Image (cartoon, rainbow, N blue to C red):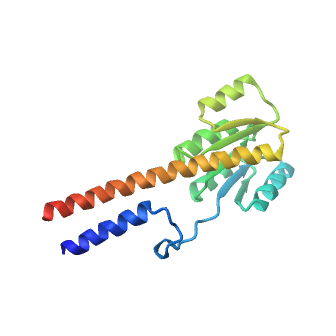
């Protein structure tokens, strides 16, 4: 009985912290990175969708804040890109709603109508960044990549902490049996 428990602990630790993700027991392919685009201007939405799909992202799109929040509730996203001025719910309200769904999910606000007040409002809502249109697509791509990388590292760190806590619990159970 003790032999199997130690073997389970060793496999668990190896899977959780193994630097070689290509080993046989780590064969699950990761899902493509998913982003949500929210803009009421269809032309801009189409350009952004095409740009990110060409980069290999799985793209969800919405033309209103309400529809975007519904998608954020249903889908496993890695980031959100939202226009500030939307009919109904504006971009900062979307940030606040998304934060209620997933507090760590990065949300970048884009706007053609920048103001000091809206930038402060975006910061207070905990937007990841605030970009002014027009912008270089390469710059937007860099901001999105950095936001996603930071989000993924945060998620990975949380998973490792959870797995470490589970491993400690298993080790303590094994100690108690001996």
Whether 2 is drawn above or below 72: the answer is below
Residue 134, position as x, y percentages in the image: 85, 39
Instruction: Using the image as rendered, state which of residue 140 and residue 61 is in the foreground.
Output: 140
On-image quarter of the N terminus: bottom left
Can residue 85 be seen in this snapshot? Answer: no
Name the quadrant containing residue 18: bottom left
Can residue 118 be seen in this snapshot? Answer: yes
Whether 73 is drawn above or below 143: the answer is below
Residue at the outermost front position? 19
Instruction: Using the image as rendered, state which of residue 16 and residue 151 is in the foreground.
Output: 16
Name the quadrant containing residue 98: top right
On-image quarter of the C terminus: bottom left
Whether 35 is drawn above or below 15: the answer is above
Residue at x 71%, y 59% (from the top left corner): 59
* 142 horizontally vs 100: left or right: right
Whether 129 is drawn above or below 98: the answer is above
What is the tally of numbered marks visible in this picture? 0
Residue at x 68%, y 53% (from the top left corner): 36
Residue 141, position as x, y percentages in the image: 75, 48
Residue 100, position as x, y percentages in the image: 53, 43
Residue at the outermost top position? 116
Residue at x 26%, y 61% (from the top left corner): 170
Instruction: Using the image as rendered, state which of residue 105 and residue 157 is in the foreground.
Output: 157
* 41 horizontally vs 105: left or right: right
């Amino acid at each position: 009985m003790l032999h199997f428990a130690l073997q389970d602990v060793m496999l668990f630790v190896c899977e959780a912290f193994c630097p070689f993700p290509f080993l046989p027991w780590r064969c699950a392919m990761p899902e493509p990175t998913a982003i949500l685009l929210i803009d009421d201007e269809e032309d801009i939405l189409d350009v952004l969708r095409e740009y990110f799909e060409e980069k290999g992202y799985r793209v969800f799109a919405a033309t209103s804040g309400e529809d975007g929040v519904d998608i954020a509730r249903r889908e496993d996203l890695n980031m959100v890109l939202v226009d500030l001025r939307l009919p109904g719910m504006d971009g900062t309200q979307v940030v606040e709603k998304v934060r209620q769904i997933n507090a760590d999910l990065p949300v970048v606000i884009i706007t053609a109508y920048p103001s000091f007040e809206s930038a402060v409002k975006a910061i207070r809502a905990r937007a990841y960044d605030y970009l002014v249109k027009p912008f270089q697509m390469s710059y937007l791509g860099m901001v999105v990549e950095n936001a996603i990388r930071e989000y993924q590292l945060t998620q990975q760190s949380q998973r490792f902490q959870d797995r470490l806590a589970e491993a400690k619990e298993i080790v303590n159970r094994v100690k108690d049996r001996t």
